[in-house]
Image (cartoon, rainbow, N blue to C red):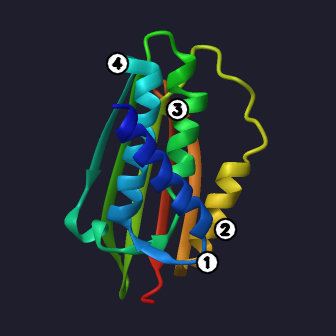
Amino acid sequence: RAEDAVLDLADLMRSSLTAGQKLIPLSEEVELCEKYLQIESMRMGDRLQWQFTVSPEAAKINIPSLSLQPLVENAVLHGVSQIPAGGIIKLDANTEVQGESTALILKVQNPVPDTPADEGNQIALKNVSARLLAGASGLLSLASRIESGNYIIEISMVPNER
């Protein structure tokens, strides 16, 4: 397990060094998120669970590297880790035809503690928005809300064809 954790950390470090410099398939970003969660699960055990549902079409779409991982990291830090019983982080990624374009639709959700911390400075959301905007050819929306005990982030973007 320790060797796997070290390899996962190395992948995370490599990705952070090249972040924003390249577009990668969503499937690679999802793999990076899973590596991060595997590392965190060594610390949190069964309290941390995740369920990722990514359509085959969405998996192929290129997005800027480290566009999704900060959202998953926040879901752990400000959500699941603050709840004694833990919880599940969910990711849904699909495509949707919007006019003549195909949009990537991402939804990340995590449970919130009974007494959530303040909203913080929203740096991760601002960074993710900037990264995705750089990788979008049009329509980009990023909205967050709390609903039924879950913090939900929804992103819609038309990716560049680069």
Closer to the observer: label 2 or label 3?
Answer: 3
Q: Amino acid at mark 3?
A: Val
Residue identified by numbered label 3: 76
For this orientation, the residue located farthest to the front is 3
Q: Are marks 1 and 2 in contact (CB under 8 Å)?
A: yes
Q: Are marks 4 and 1 in contact (CB under 8 Å)?
A: no
Residue 26 drawn above or below residue 99: above
Using a 10 Å C-alpha cutoff, classify the residue at mark 3 as few (fewer than 14 neighbours), some (14 to 19) or many (20 or more). Answer: many
Cα separation, mark 3 vs mark 1, equals 26 Å
Sequence-wise, the earlier of marks 2 and 3 is 3
Residue identified by numbered label 2: 130
Percent coordinates x, y for residue 58 in the rendering: 30, 67
Q: Nearer the viewer, residue 162 or 10?
A: 10
Can residue 66 be seen in the rendering of this structure? no
Q: At 73% from the left edge and 50% from the top edge, which residue is drawn?
A: 123
**Left or right relative to 130: residue 139:** left
Q: Are marks 4 and 2 in contact (CB under 8 Å)?
A: no
Q: Which mark is residue 46?
A: 4
Residue 89 drawn above or below residue 144: above
Sequence-wise, the earlier of marks 3 and 1 is 3
Q: Amino acid at mark 4?
A: Asp
Using a 10 Å C-alpha cutoff, classify the residue at mark 4 as few (fewer than 14 neighbours), some (14 to 19) or many (20 or more). Answer: few
Residue identified by numbered label 1: 134
Secondary structure at numbered mark 3? helix
Q: At 20% from the left edge and 66% from the top edge, which residue is drawn?
A: 56
Secondary structure at numbered mark 1? helix
